[in-house]
Image: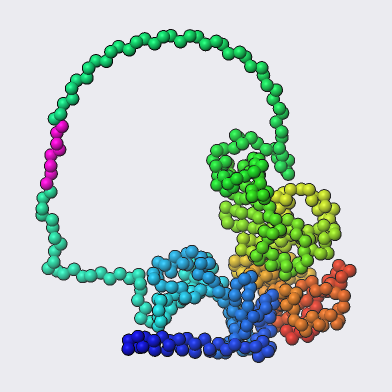
Amino acid sequence: MKKLGKLVVILFAVQIVALQVSFAQKLKPADVPSEVSQAMDFQYPYVKVSAWQLDGENYIATFKDEGAVGKAYISRSGEWLRTTYDVKKDELPSVITEYVKTNYPDFIISGSFLEEKENEPLHYMLEVKQEGIGFKPSKLTFSDKGELTSRVDPDNFKDPTATETKPVADNVQPKQNTTPKQTTAPKQNTTTKPASEPKPAAKPEPKPKPEAAPKPEKPKKEKPATVVTDEHGNVAIAESDVPEVVRKNLLKKILHPEDLNWFEIDNQYVAKCVNSGRKTAAYFSKDGVWDKTLTVLPEEAVTGPVLKHLNDFYKGFKFKTAIKETRADKDDKTMVEFYEKANYKAKVPTTVIFDKTGKLLRTIDADPEMADANTKADGKDDLDKYYAKMNMSLEEKANSSSSIPENIQAVFKLKYPRVTNVEWKATSDMNYEAHYYSARGKEICVISSMGNIVETLLQGKPENLSATIQSYLKKEYKGCKLVEYYSVKRIAEKLNLYKVIIQEKKATEQTELWFNLNGKPFNN
């Protein structure tokens, strides 16, 4: 009977869970209101929805973004509410898992995800509970750095870290050990050794005969030492001139360096070698502290978000080279040079720079005026070109922000405190544009000279442009190619639009077209 009772309880709990799941009704794309689907397309123009659900008054769109499963919650009126991304337990920051282990021992993480909301920083949401049926979870919120921001425990929650102390009775006194310890005197060694007998005197050794003087050797002809230089003209130094601590730390980073040469560059020791068949350069301070390592990557090593970005935005590209920079401060980067179709014959490369998570930091567009210079520089070392590109990127970024008023930059920093690598542009209509890359892709924030954010733009993938707009372009603009398009939010007007940029195949000028969310032309 007891077993039957337990079975009934389990079946009842399963039915309750099934009822709860059934509340989220699955929908066909045709059953989703146009306001909701347009809001999703506007908020995430670069993804495709794999499933729609209706949960109460809200619609849920399930999609994949850079390999992560996301769920966007949108109201019936077409207002985006929030988006959650599933996060595996083993991918959570260690500071979060350590907090759970310490404060919720023997509990399990029943749910973990990232949540994105309007005007709120990206944060982690966790549910932890005791194993078994009927236990309600505790809900925890952490910042993107793993700092606890809120903790909500259910009613009748018993803190597992609390310890109970048993009261001591008044009449009971601790027992005292009254038994004295017995000490034993150390035994004395009474055995006496007999006196040793005198040894016989040693015989005197014979005197050695004097050795004959060695014949002087003929001096050998020394071969002239070969001078090794790097791509910058720096002359290699002898390995004996490199401190031992530097040489030891190199072997911690690179186990079997081949064709190793040492250089002293900019107050650093640089080891240039071949590691696992790849050209490598490791940088150390004078004290032997490792700073960074540059590695030339083959085309097959360019994978993940980097390759996805190239395939999405530069179809038919031709790979040129890639460099990975692994840094001690963990601010790793990867640079990829490639040829777009239009620039392949002229051999003018486009450059993209990503961080270690695959997030795009900067794009350096192909410059046709540099065709001759790039052709001549093809023999130049890849690592040398990496720093040339990085330096150019830094100079452009510094020049772009130096002419922007401080109050304009302050407005942007207040709105987007965690955004870095911003490229500023002053427009002809007295506005300022901040170009940057977020987890959603390329974004532009337009700020007026009065310090008001007037417009935000989010770049979408060309293939995700609505069919209505695509058919309009084929009919009205034959022979033109789609360069890019943006979802645009006009703050003051509370207006959502699409900005489409097209270009004739044999022309260099580009044309801007505007459409409303229904795909109809809009007079801007």
Q: Nearer the viewer, residue 70 or 496?
A: 70
Q: Magenta region's main secondary structure? A: loop
Q: Position of residue 416 (x, y in %)?
A: 61, 69
Residue located at (64% from left, 80% from top): 50
Q: Which image quadrant is residue 314 in?
A: bottom right
Q: Position of residue 181 (x, y in %)?
A: 12, 48
Residue located at (56% from left, 72% from top): 122
Is 278 left or right of 117, judged from the image as shown? right
Q: Position of residue 254 (x, y in %)?
A: 59, 47
Q: Is residue 522 above or below residue 207?
A: below
Magenta residues? Answer: 182-189
Is 451 left or right of 153, judged from the image as shown? right
Q: Position of residue 149 (x, y in %)?
A: 48, 71
Q: Which image quadrant is residue 237 in?
A: top right
Q: Nearer the viewer, residue 399 or 120?
A: 120
Q: Name the quadrant of the N terminus.
A: bottom left
Q: Nearer the viewer, residue 352 or 253?
A: 253
Q: Is residue 331 above or below residue 3?
A: above
Q: Which image quadrant is residue 153 in?
A: bottom left
287 falls in the magenta region: no
Residue located at (32% from left, 86% from top): 2
| Residue 457 shows in the view | no
Q: Name the quadrant of the C terminus.
A: bottom right
